[in-house]
Image: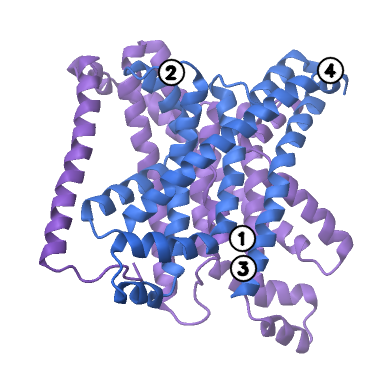
Amino acid sequence: MSSVLYDVPGPKARRVSVIGSVVGSLLILGLLAWIISTLAQQGIFEGRRWAIFTRADVWTLLGNGIGATLSAAAVAAVIAFPLGLMLCLLRISDLAAIRIPTRIVLEFLRGMPVVLMMLFVLLVFGTNQFIAVVAGLVLYNSAVFAEIIRAGIQSLPKGQREAGLTVGLTSFQSRMIIELPQAIRRMMPSLVAQLVVLLKDTSLGYIVAYGELLRAVQVMADFLGTQYLFPIFFVAAAIYIAINLCVSRIAVWIERRGSKKAAGGVAKAEPAVEEAAATKP
Amino acid sequence: MDAVIESLPLYWNGFLRTLFLSAVSGVIALLLGTLLAAARVSPVAALRGFSMTYVEILRNTPLTIAFFFAAIVLPRIGVKFEQFEVAAIIALSAYTAAFIAEAVRSGVNSVPVGQAEAARSIGMKFSQVLSLIILPQALRTVIPPLINILIALVKNSSVAGAFFVLELFGYGRQLANANGDQVMAVLLGVAFFYLLITVPLGILASTVERKVAIAR
């Protein structure tokens, strides 16, 4: 924390703080104990419910789910990034005839729920679920990538472009050679954060019946019996959180590494962009 | 097109449901998120730890998982809902609160240290410093990101449609199934109603942002 909102605590304040910590911890522990005892009454901690995780086919199904989740995310990211780059260039074009339609398209894509786009592609084009999920993710995330990179370009000092134009580069060359590399580098933390969002969004595939991790949970619970729902769900949620935490850590790491360097390194993303990027499911 | 015009009352119902879900969850999330942010900067270590754990876990959980938990797992462990809408509101507000907490915290960090120092030097307690001096300024600077979070909330409420809540997306899916020949028109109709909420909010966010930028 950069700002200190309270004085260095004296003996009395420390005592109050310790008491507060103990009471707070007790409250949280009490809540947890209540949840666990409720769960235990339902027999959720019986060994036989967790014994399913010794079965190979359960792990095969979970593994398939993870594979489906990661492959949809990977394919979508690989397509969405160059597309976002292109949309960004169109969005900041000098020609209003290109700039304005692109802006409308971007506003449209950013303003719609991703799951609606997935359903749209699935039903209107009659594709399979994988393509629908990837298309939904690509449409939404390329628009977000475009906006993030645009924010990066606009955060550059004006002189960068002016200098480029002065030495005789065309507008396009200046964008490609001078501005984009800096903008992408500056916005790296936001771009990686958006990857977390993209990864989380694959779980929307559940709604269009794509066989990702959550769908695998549902299928297994239907197949093995609902008494196994909680253990399987718990494991799946833990897997999701673990994967996403890893990617988030990478974003934090890039940010730290960038901020150690002086100018030209990774700038703090504008909070608005960061938040917009980070709030999707 | 006929299907869209015939079902306008359904669309309208769904639109109102979406607005209702978003508004209720938004208010709860704003309150909860501000509390979490306050806990995050408080001198009590347990509160800081709790807030941090909450935010880290919820931010890295897909919304669908949160919904699945609220709508399917919670009832199985004894928390029964009269309506699925309650589950949807729990999932949406718990999820959104984590993002609001992060935004408000970044706002708190953006308030100059001198403000807190001045407040402390005239003898204010931590709770007074936070509620009277820091939060009002912090919230003002983070209004644009907060609006963006609320836009995301509106879009996220579409997930409720998949969990038995009949809002815009839920009706859209029903209509699309019922009118196999006009799927495109039906879904574009749904999109239109979402844009009716999200685009004005987006314009509002960028206007406020420009204003704040000038004020600095």
- Viewer-closest of A212 and A204: A204
Q: Label 1 sits on what residue type?
A: Ile
**Location of mark 4 (residue):** B6
**Camera-nearest label, 2 or 4:** 2
Q: Label 2 sits on what residue type?
A: Phe
Q: In this view, does A235 lie to the left or right of B144?
A: left
Label 2: how many Cα within 10 Å (few below 14, some 14–19, many 20+): few
Earlier residue among tags 3 and 2: 2
Residue at left 69%, top 54%?
B204
Residue A238, image quadrant: top left
Image location (x, y in percent) of residue B184:
80, 27
In the rendered view, tell whether residue A23 sits above or below residue B185. Answer: below
Q: The purple chain is which one?
A: A
The colour of chain B is blue
Residue at left 31%, top 68%?
B124
Same subunit: marks 1 and 2: no
Say what secondary structure mark 1 lies in.
helix
**Location of mark 3 (residue):** B212
Earlier residue among tags 3 and 4: 4
**Chain letter of disc 2 in the image:** B
Identify the image quadrant of the N terminus of chain B.
Answer: top right
Image location (x, y in percent) of residue B119:
35, 72
Earlier residue among tags 2 and 4: 4
Say what secondary structure mark 2 lies in.
loop
Q: Residue A57 carries which label?
A: none
**Chain letter of disc 1 in the image:** A
**Location of mark 1 (residue):** A148
Q: Which mark is residue B81?
A: 2
Same subunit: marks 3 and 4: yes
Q: Label 4 sits on what residue type?
A: Glu
Residue at left 34%, top 26%?
A59
Q: Is residue B157 visible?
A: yes
